[in-house]
Image (cartoon, helix red, strand yellow):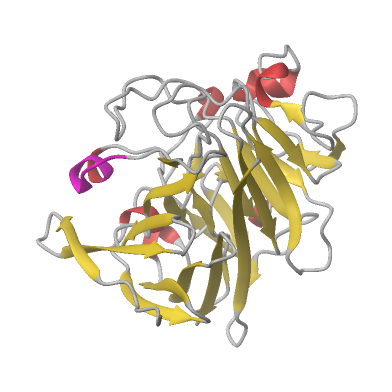
Amino acid sequence: MSVEPPEAEIFGETATGAPVEVFTLTNRHGIRLRAMTYGAIVLSLETPDRFGKNADIVLGYNTLAEYMRDTPYFGAVCGRFCNRIAGGKFTLDGQQYTLATNNEPGGIKCSLHGGLKGFDKVLWRGEAFVKDGAQGVKFSYTSRDAEEGYPGTLNLSVTYLLTDDNEWCIDYEATTDKATPVNITQHSYFNLKGEGNGDILGHELMLNATGFTPVSSGLIPTGELRQVKGTPLDFTSAKIIGERVNSEDEQMRYARGYDHNWVLDNTSGELVLAATVYEPTSGRTLKLLTTEPGLQFYSGNFLDGKLTGKSGQPYHSRNGFCLESQRYPDSPNQPSFPDVILRPGQTWRSATVFQFGAR
């Protein structure tokens, strides 16, 4: 039977009356992913447990109004530069640029995930398609010169494809007319027990990384690359997330848990395994492969119970985790980190794949 492109449905309207569309991708194993044009946000992701019973494994809301009012980047694409930039400033080709400082961990201001109106809060264009028998949607956005303080007009596309191999494939592509930093990620919060079913501390995590970038009290990298061996950040073999999350280690105290960039053992630029997660009560598994050199693992420390999710349950600290493939945080101010500058005539490409299963 032929596979048809997913049809767009109206999810709501922006404050200016622009319609927001939602696309539902399905595969033959019953996995179902819903994503909308506002923020390229993944609204829900249903996968089966070891008994074949589906549950929605990503945190979020039921209405557009809730996403527009208050969200810690649930399910969104973040950019133009995801993660943090120290003091909201960087210098490029001799010119200093100033960004909004919309985050201040430890009382120290920084720019986070693109600023006040990053890619998570804009309206993308959505185009449904089928590739090799799999349903997909391509989101496109043009970020104008000086938007949120960044130089250059950036033409960007983000493609979601849901395959019959139970893979959610994400492909990013961007060009610019002026040199600009680019660092874009997908910011879904996962709970493999199912959204609204408590914390993620019993999940088992492996990170394919022997190093990380330690941070200051403002959660800005110091510039050092440090080995994870002998620290609570060592996930080179599978560990239970909650085992060391409350460690008195300085790095853990700064972030109130895990909120760090791991240096992946990936220098090829090809898709390589970066992380595996297993949730023992449901049997659900998740694997992440990426072309990127870094991965931010965030254990949902700053969720505080004030936001109520899709199932009517408040989201408390550590009720979800994020795995954000990326270049390193604050790279425009860290010359020793991998280059993040996209220049005219170049095409920036990045790929990340989430693989779902159960055992």
Asked where in the image residue 343 lies, by quadrant, the reply is: bottom right
Which of the pair 345/195 is nearer the observer?
195
Tell me if residue 11 comes above or below residue 257 in the rendering.
Answer: below
Looking at the rendering, the stretch of residues picked out in magenta corresponds to: 61-67
Residue at (51, 46) in percent of width and height:
88
Residue at (51, 22) in percent of width and height:
199
- Counting from the top left corner in percent of width and height, residue 64 is at 21, 48
Residue at (54, 66) in percent of width and height:
164
Tell me if residue 158 comes above or below residue 312 in the rendering.
Answer: below
Which of the pair 306/346 is nearer the observer?
306
- Counting from the top left corner in percent of width and height, residue 42 is at 39, 53
Tell me if residue 150 comes above or below residue 120 in the rendering.
Answer: below
Residue at (75, 38) in percent of width and height:
206
Which residue sits furthest bottom?
Answer: 345
Residue 282 located left or right of residue 135: right
Which quadrant holds the C terminus? Answer: top right
- Report whether residue 144 is seen: no
Tell me if residue 239 comes above or below residue 66 in the rendering.
Answer: above
- Report whether residue 151 is seen: yes
Which quadrant holds the N terminus? Answer: bottom left
Total count of labels: 0
Q: Is residue 267 magenta?
A: no
Residue 251 located left or right of residue 95: right
Residue 110 located left or right of residue 306: right
- Counting from the top left corner in percent of width and height, residue 174 is at 52, 76
Asked where in the image residue 39 lies, by quadrant, the reply is: bottom left
Q: Is residue 65 magenta?
A: yes
- Counting from the top left corner in percent of width and height, residue 33 is at 40, 56
